[in-house]
């Protein structure tokens, strides 16, 4: 009994290599459907960049930041770091996503 293969509608659920299979095809995902590590890192970096750009936009609309920009012509230090970090992270995310799609 231990050597019997599990069957469903006359077909074995495991092939001779021990991989699971079903009547419609192989259960294991093909390489085309897997997210590569660079794609995952690219999505994370893009999300962080978008979040930082949102924080920069919110910070730039505060009355203190608008008054500082009107007097000095520049945003405050925190707003600038949010902008620089957001643009950098978004650019890195787009680059990693492009690299992942070029490789696959």
Image (tube, rainbow, N blue to C red):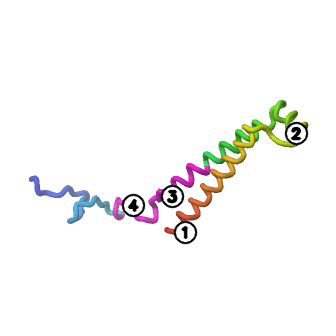
Residue in the image at 65% along x and 43% along y:
51
**Circle 2 or circle 3, nearest the eye:** 2
Residue in the image at 46% along x and 65% along y:
32
Range shown magenta:
25-46
What residue is pinned by disc 2? 72
Q: Position of residue 20 (x, y in %)?
A: 28, 58
* Numbered badge on residue 29: 4
Q: Is residue 18 left or right of residue 97?
A: left
| Magenta residue check for 32 | yes
Q: Position of residue 52 (x, y in %)?
A: 67, 43
Separation of marks 4 and 1 at Cα, in angstroms: 20 Å
Specify which label sits upstream in the sequence, 4 or 1.
Answer: 4
Q: Residue furthest top?
A: 64
What residue is pinned by disc 3? 38
Circle 3 Cα neighbour tier, 10 Å, few/some/many (<14 / 14–19 / ≥20): some
Q: Residue furthest right?
A: 71
Separation of marks 4 and 2 at Cα, in angstroms: 57 Å
């Amino acid at each position: 009994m231990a050597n019997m293969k599990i069957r469903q509608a006359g077909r074995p659920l495991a092939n001779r290599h021990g991989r699971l299979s079903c009547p419609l095809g192989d259960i294991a995902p093909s390489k085309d459907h897997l997210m590569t590590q660079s794609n995952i890192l690219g999505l994370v970096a893009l999300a962080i960049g978008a979040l930082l750009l949102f924080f920069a936009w919110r910070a730039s609309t505060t009355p203190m930041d608008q008054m500082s920009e009107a007097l000095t012509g520049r945003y405050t230090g925190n707003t600038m770091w949010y902008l620089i970090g957001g643009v950098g992270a978004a650019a890195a995310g787009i680059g990693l996503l492009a690299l992942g799609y070029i490789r696959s």
